[in-house]
Image (cartoon, rainbow, N blue to C red):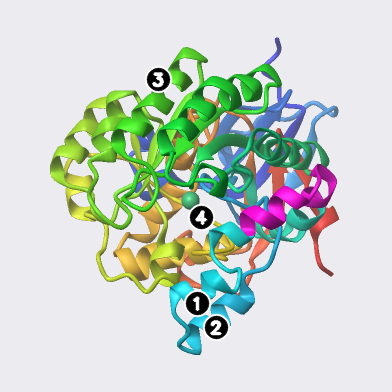
Amino acid sequence: MSNRPERIWTNVNLATLDADVGEPYGARIDCAVGVRDGRIVAVAPMEDIAILPSSTEVIDGEGGWLTPGLIDAHTHLVFAGNRAREFELRLQGVGYEEIARQGGGILSTVKATRAAGVEELVELARPRLEALLREGVTGVEIKSGYGLDLESELNMLRAARALGERYPVRVSTSLLAAHALPPEFEGEPDAYIDRVCDEIIPAAVAEGLADAVDVFCETIAFSPAQCERVFQAAQAHGLGIRAHVEQLSNQHGAELAARYGAWSVDHLEWLDEAGIEAMAQAGTVATLLPGAFYFLHETRVPPIDLLRRHRVPMAVATDLNPGSSPLASLRLAMNMACTLFRLTPEEALAGVTRHAARALGQGRELGQIKVGMHADMVLWDIEHPAELAYQFGVNPIKQRIIGGRIVGKEVRNV
Ligand SMILES: [Zn+2]
């Protein structure tokens, strides 16, 4: 294989996020990036660019900044139904039970999702996915978890895969059948976990629909022992492991998931040091979800300083979902991670690139501008990479690049 670039971006500043560069953001000023066969094959200062063969396509970056493509490592963006009325009722002072009686809550999303076919789920997800792509997302994780029966869970994952085929974006899927107890299993959570392990996981694997499993480990969802059974089934089928843990209480789910080599544990407001030590040892990423913290008006912040001290990589994601984080902006999630959790803008950018890739088990292939990696990048019209976490509501994107090709005009709202 030749390393001669087929396409080259010139006159760009780079936030490589490559730790080996030894500068904040892995920054390199006034550079060129060459790509070939979808991969980055050259990163060099402009003054080192030799005369290029005429077959090389040259794209002038005009002094903009190139970053790795943004990756939203935690979303529930495939679902049916609408919870805006429930939001309104809650703010009018109507209690949780009354809302549930009127058909609100997660089970309303389950009911609507079960009633929708794959095509309807795809159509409903389009605007949410397009909003993410417009802001520079090149990779997105999408979970099931509103079907809670075999066919509906598979349909959600089929819709997620279809979105990955119809849009220029890398979709990673997580089977979150252990999200909530379906009404038909009321009082029998262990029987439902049997169903998840014995039927739903094998069926999703047989159809190639899941890259990982996910669970909701919480007093209002599933116990650590029940989650452990899901992890064991995932391991037996060669799937990655992720978990919603320590969001509302400390169930020691992070420690448990880390023992099973989890790629990522997510939320983490109630995480303790024992959990952090287990994560550090296992190389598990801490995925922070400030959108849910914000929307639920939480007050307990994840233990950011302890995570830093133990050098646990921190990802940042939207948690885009209808109930607790109707947030379709990864850049706003970056800003919230800074304002609400006190991450630095550099940590926030690493959280949606290098560490987000690792949370999806793809850290060797994605998330940095580095020779050998997939050429997924974004060209921004900014003066400094801190702007990406600083300002929101303004979109300074110039180009979205996947596998070395400029993509995304089809989702541009002109
Ligand atoms: Zn979630």
Quote the CA–CA distance across marks 3 and 1.
38 Å
Q: Is residue 328 magenta?
A: no
Of the residues shown, which amino acid type is indicated by label 3? Gln
Mark 3 vs 1: CB contact within 8 A: no
Q: Which mark is residue 316?
A: none
| Residue 163 is at least partly visible in this image | yes
Helix, strand or loop status at disc 2: helix
Q: Which mark is residue 98?
A: 1
Question: Which quadrant: the C terminus?
Answer: bottom right
Q: Which residue does the numbered mark 2 point to in the structure image?
A: 89
| Residue 17 is at least partly visible in this image | no
Q: Which mark is residue 319?
A: 4
Query: Which of the two discs, 4 and 2, labels the residue nearer the N terminus?
Result: 2
Q: Which mark is residue 232?
A: 3
Point out the stretch of residues depicted in magenta: 109-122
Mark 1 vs 2: CB contact within 8 A: yes
Helix, strand or loop status at disc 4: loop
Quote the CA–CA distance across marks 3 and 4.
25 Å
Question: Can you give x and y, in whole percent of width and height, for residue 197 in the image?
Answer: 50, 24
Badge 1 density bin: few <14, some 14–19, many ≥20, Cα 10 Å: few
Query: Which of the two discs, 3 and 2, labels the residue nearer the N terminus?
Result: 2
Question: Can you give x and y, in whole percent of width and height, for residue 355 in the image?
Answer: 42, 40
State whether label 4 is within 8 Å of ligand 1. yes
